[in-house]
Structure formats: structure tokens, C-alpha cells
Amino acid sequence: MYTSVWKACVFTSLPVFIFQWECSWFFLLCCSFLLLFVWSYFWLEILALWHIVLGQQLNLYWIHKIVVLAILLTTTTGVVFIDDFWQDEWDIVIISLQFTGPFLHIGALAVVTALGWVIAGQVVRVERSRLQVVTLVIYVSLLLVLYLVPLFISSPCIMDRSKLGPRPAVIGRRGAPMLAPEHTIMSFSKALQQKVTALEADVTISLDGVPFLMRDRTLRRTTNVDKLFPARQDHDASFFNWTEIRSLNAGLWFLRDDPYWTVQYMSEKDRNRTANQTVCSLAELLRLAARMNRSVIFSLRRPPRQHPHHQLWVSDALKVIQRSSILPEQVMWTPDWYRKKVRAAVPLLQQTSDEKLPVAELKERGISTLTLHYSQARAQDISRQFSGSNVSVNVYPVNEPWLYSLMWCSGVQSVSSDAPHILKKVPNPVWIMSADEYGLIWITSDLISVAIVIGIFIFQKWKMSGMRSYNPEQIMLSAVVRRPSRDVNLMKEKLIFSGETHEHTTVWR
């Protein structure tokens, strides 16, 4: 009986297993086909380019033209979709050009210089056409633009090393969210281990007026609210009282989702600790910062209108600050609401703002620190406008060494980072050079490019003039394999005989 039950179970579950296995193989097959298609299209493009270089016609069939147009349409659609989806992220491309501009210029100059071989091969031919003239003019114009473009390249890292300011302080943004669940005591402890100078958090007010740390509007992403309160999982986080919030687990999601692919590097002890994390209150964060003698910067989210503490949210946060053991000057107050009231209640609080205002207005509001997104942190404004007015600038989010180096060269005093463990390993800017050094590299690169381009055109002209001195029979003979064979000898004799016959015929005429 047990045997038949076992067989029934096995054969019942077998189709499901086979279906899942077949789906996996089908997915791999589709991926392989797409990669092969893209790879084949890439090599077809190279083959077409060489056809044009050699002066041959492409002779495309109608099916080829349809495929090319379809791929062009698909690529254009994809670019438009990405532009719409990542519209707010294009700023990082512009900023990255400030860091990579000098090196991209050298790379582009090398590519265009190498392209001179193809251009020279087309221009020095016997047949003259308008296309050749246009091609030469475009190529020379492109070269001139590349030779002069460094005049317009501006990078904060092109500066004298003696003018480089001190290393920007690193603030743990939501703790160290790459090493532990964000906004938990474990995350802030990990950030303190990386020698951060301050801790940054997002604060929300609970239903009973307790300020707690939460970035999202709901509790779904970072807690197990869907299991304990499934009917309320889409509710605003501020509509839960502190007892309910404290009962939630705030660490299991990190082990499950592995948002930064760092769980595999965690020790067993850290994994167990992560699995038992709870939502952190503002009071707990202030106690930890006071014990470690660190500053705290936080943004305060106002509860919805239906919330009982909609009008009391600022006073709720101030009460927690006043009751904690942290020094008032170690707390950086960001919200603009009731700022005069806050300054009157706790005068020693450091007033910060995330709005880029004129220096006169910042001083009028008593703001000493400006917190800006990296897209708003321009080196000219920092060095000219804020540094001379004793207004420090904090930039967020800065997670990569190159961006940290760029902010360092720009004169930023501090950065908020999700990756303090990475920035800890950046003792100096990734690169920095003086204007004289960059000028020397620029002039040297241009001179080398000019010499190579001129040499290519001279060589192609010499090569083409040498080919003109040969008749077709000699070119064909030179292309034949040098190793003697019966077929090669017969071909040579036929060509020579045809040449002699042609000469006799000409003399007779």
C-alpha cells in the first residue's frame, strides 16, 4: 500500500517538475537566440562597413532592408522608453562627463585618428567625386573640433593639488543600508564602524505620536506587515500605533530580497541579528548617536490630514530631542515648517535646508548647512557662493568613489552615502591634475594625432600611386601564391601570351 501511495505521489508531482524544467530550458533557449541574433547583427554591420571601405556595393535584399529598419525602430523605441523611465537619472550622465571628460577626449581622438585610414583610402582614389570632398571636409572638421574641445572641458579635478580642500566627511544615510537593513539599530551600528561623522534618517510620526524611522509611505517593503496586518498593508505607515509598529520584523526582507547582493558576505552571526531587527524609533537613534558622540540629520514627514498629530508633528519631534541625552548642536534640523518656532524652542539646533536659496536668505533663516542632491552641487556655486559665506554643503547620495572624488574636488564639506564602507577606502581623489599637466597632455595628443593622420594620407597616396603603375595582368600575377605549381605556371604563361599578343596587334595596327 505504501509503495502505491509513493508511486502515485511521485508520478503526480513529476509532470509539474518536468514542466518547470522545460520552462527553464525554454527561457535559456530564448536568451541564447537573442544573444546570437545581436551578435550576428553586430558582425553583419562590420562586414557592411568593410564593403563600403573597399568600395563595393552592399546589394541588400528587401528582407535585409526590412530587418535593418525593424532593428532601428526597436532601438529607437527602447531609447525613448529608457529616457522616460530614467528621466531623473540623466543628471548623473552629465556629471560623469565632468569626471571622465579629459579621458573621453583622448579616447575619441584615438578613434577618429584611426578612422583616418578608412577616410584616406576613399579620398586618394583616382576617381574624384563630390562625396569624397564632403567626406574629407567632415573628417577634417571633426578633427579640428576634437583638437580644440579641451578649451571647453571643465572638471573640478583639474586644479592645483595645493588648493584641494580637506576630505569630505561621510554621513551614514539610513545607516549602512548595503550592510544591514536600513533604518535599524544594526544599520546605524555598521555605519559607525565605518567611522561616519553623522547619521541620517527619515522620520515619520506614529498614530500615537511616537517619531520612528521609515523611508516609505507604507510598511510593505521593509517589514512583515503583510503577515501580521494583511488588511492594512497598504495603509500609510503613520496610521499604525507604536505598539503595532514595534511588533513588526524589519530585517527578514533584507535577507529575502538581498537588495545590494551583500547577504552572501554576511557572517552567520550577522544574519541571525538581521533576522531579529525591529523598527527603530527616533529616541533610540538619538541615544546611540549621543553615546558615540555623533551628529544626527533627519527629514521629517508630515502625517496626512486625517492623522491626530497632523498639527503636532513638529512638537512631537522636538520633545524627543529635548528629552534625549544628545547635545542640541549635534542635531541638524531640516524641515522648513515652523522653523522660527523651532529656533525659539531649541536655539542651538543646527538649521539645515534642502532648498538651494540665495546666501542672504539662508542667513536670514539661520541656516548653516545646505543639503543638496548631487545634480545641484556645482563646483562654481560651492567655491564662490557658499564657501565664502560660511555655509557648509552636504551632497546626497554619493555612493561611488568617482563621484566622491568629484565632490571632494568641488569643495564639498560632507556627503550622505549608502555605502560608507566603500568611501572609507578612498583616501585621495581618484585623479587630480593641474591645468598645466592637462594642457601638456592635450597638446601632445593633438600633435601625435596630426602626425599619424598626415602619415596615413601620405602612405595611402604612395600606395595608390604604386598601384597605378601596374597593369591588370601584373596585379593578378602579384596576387597569385608564390609557391610554384602547374596551375600557377599555366596562368602566368596565358597572361604573358595574352600580353604579347596584345602588343603585336597594336604594332600591326
Image (spheres, helix red, strand yellow):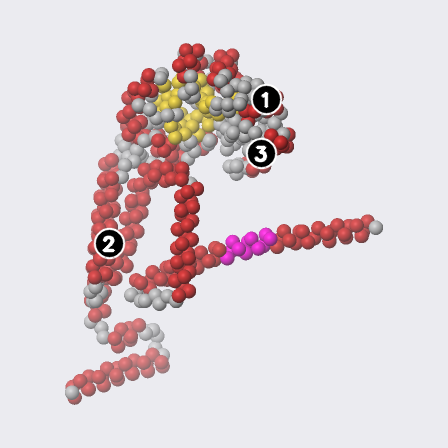
> Foreground: 484 or 478?
478
Q: Secondary structure at mark 3?
A: helix
**Does label 1 or label 2 sit earlier along the sequence?**
2
Count of number-bearing discs: 3
Q: How far is the residue under mark 2 from the one under mark 3? A: 56 Å
**Does label 3 or label 1 sit earlier along the sequence?**
1
Identified at 28% across, 59% down, the residue is: 118
**Does label 2 or label 3 sit earlier along the sequence?**
2
Predominant SS of the magenta segment: helix
**470 relative to 8 in the view: left or right:** left
* Residue for badge 3: 253
* Residue for badge 2: 139
> Foreground: 53 or 79?
79
Q: Which residues are magenta?
A: 23-33
In reply to whether residue 27 is colored magenta, the answer given is yes
The quarter of the picture where the C terminus appears is: bottom left
Q: Residues within 10 Å of mark 3 (few under 14, many from 20)?
A: some
Where's residue 259, x and y in %?
52, 37
* Residue for badge 1: 241
Identified at 26% across, 84% down, the residue is: 497
In reply to whether residue 256 is colored magenta, the answer given is no
Where's residue 122, x and y in %?
25, 62
Where's residue 397, x and y in %?
42, 31
User: Does residue 391 appear in the picture of this structure?
Assistant: yes
